[in-house]
Amino acid sequence: MNRRVVTFHYTLRDPSGRVLDSSAGGSPVTYLEGAGQIIDGLDEQLRDVAAGAKTRVEVPAAKAYGERDPAQIQRIPRAMLPVDGEVQVGAQFQTGPDRGDPVVTVVGVEGEEIVLDGNHPLAGVPLTFDVEIVGAREANAEELSHGHAHGGGGGGCGEGCGCH
Ligand code: ZN
């Protein structure tokens, strides 16, 4: 089966029904099937969904942001945190300068020690996506060789493609 480039709108909810993210009112998301551009479980379950269709996709945690890993919880001396003043439980810090660097969450403050959780905030959380496929077409040869979609019309590599 040929791989498609799919454009969709989505609303993402956690098991309590809280909206975590949504493309409503913004641009839809475009991705190349099987290229790891969206989470695996969503990619797999949208393979047979045609353009124009609306569907609800339930993605187990293991196929979304993974199960929680207890080894990702660690204690560090408070002085190692790059903040002045009070450290609050729930505060999040990026571990590096890039947008894709992992985020750690403060889950405890115990005297001069901080307990950090390096699990993704959505690790262990099953996700529900309400999806509307707004477009789907066959991927072109350039997209297949680059391993990502080139926008709605397939008009070439855009900024942020990461393939240059
Ligand atoms: Zn490209």
Image (spheres, rainbow, N blue to C red):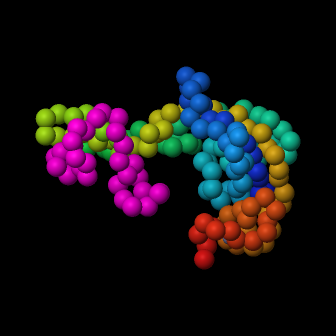
- Quadrant for ligand 1 reads bottom right
Quarter location, residue 4: bottom right
Left or right for 148, reference 17: right
The residue under the point 63% across, 51% down is 38
Question: Does the magenta run of residues contain 55?
Answer: no
Left or right for 110, reference 162: left
- Relative image position of residue 96 (x, y in whole percent): 36, 59
The residue under the point 47% across, 35% down is 124
The residue under the point 57% across, 26% down is 18
Q: Which residues are magenta?
A: 75-103
The secondary structure that dominates the magenta segment is: loop
Left or right for 142, reference 117: right
The residue under the point 76% across, 51% down is 7
Looking at the image, which is closer to me, 113 or 127? 113
Please count the marks in the image.
Answer: 0
Looking at the image, which is closer to me, 145 or 12? 12
* Placement of 118 over or under 18, stated as above or below: below
- Relative image position of residue 1 (x, y in whole percent): 81, 57
Q: Residue furthest top?
A: 16
